[in-house]
Image (cartoon, helix red, strand yellow):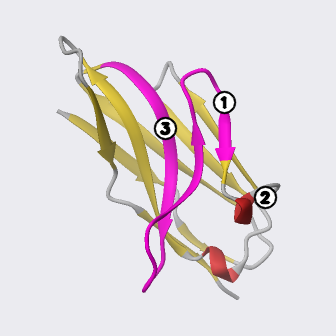
């Protein structure tokens, strides 16, 4: 099986910074695109940022210039550096990844369980 485990969430003041990480583990042959989504109460889950296996990045308009996504393929990890945080960034942040498992050819999509980021004074 494959697991995505997020870490690094917590409470931060408006204008502050926080980095969250996600590690993929299990019987992995290859990790494709990785991304971060978020969901706040009463709202649908939305894409925050995504990075392909080639390193190409996509950001939601509401985080452009403030958040930076990066990956370490040797460790199968993806990080989200969040700067200039706003109260409206408060949400549960979920890791997402396309994974090809060992001895398989299918690409399956996996989700982590989420990490809570709270931006408040």
Could you tell me residue 43's position as x and y percent? 46, 80
**Residue at 42 percent of width and 38 percent of height:** 23
Tell whether 102 sits left or right of 99.
left
Magenta stretch, main secondary structure class: strand
Q: Earlier in the sequence, mark 2 or mark 3?
A: 3
- Magenta-span inclusion, residue 111: no
Q: Give the secondary structure at mark 2.
A: loop
Q: Give the secondary structure at mark 3.
A: strand
Could you tell me residue 45's position as x and y percent? 44, 67
Residue under pointer 2: 66
Residue under pointer 3: 34
Residue under pointer 1: 56
Q: Give the secondary structure at mark 1.
A: loop
- Picture quarter containing residue 47? bottom right
Q: Label 3 neighbourhood size at 10 Å, few (<14), some (14-19), many (20+)? A: many
Q: Quadrant of the C terminus?
A: bottom right
Q: Which residues are magenta?
A: 29-58
Q: CA distance from mark 1 to mark 2?
A: 17 Å
**Residue at 31 percent of width and 32 percent of height:** 25
Could you tell me residue 64's position as x and y percent? 77, 56
């Amino acid at each position: 099986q494959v697991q995505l485990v997020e870490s690094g969430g917590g409470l931060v003041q408006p204008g502050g910074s926080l980095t969250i990480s996600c590690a993929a583990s299990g019987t992995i042959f290859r990790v494709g695109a990785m991304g971060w989504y978020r969901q706040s109460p009463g709202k649908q889950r939305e894409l925050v940022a995504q990075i392909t296996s080639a390193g190409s990045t996509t950001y939601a308009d509401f985080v452009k210039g403030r958040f930076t996504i990066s990956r370490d393929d040797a460790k199968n990890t993806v990080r989200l550096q969040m700067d200039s945080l706003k109260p409206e960034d408060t949400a549960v942040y979920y890791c997402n990844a396309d994974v090809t498992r060992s001895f398989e050819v299918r690409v399956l999509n996996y989700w982590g369980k989420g990490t809570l980021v709270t931006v408040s004074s």
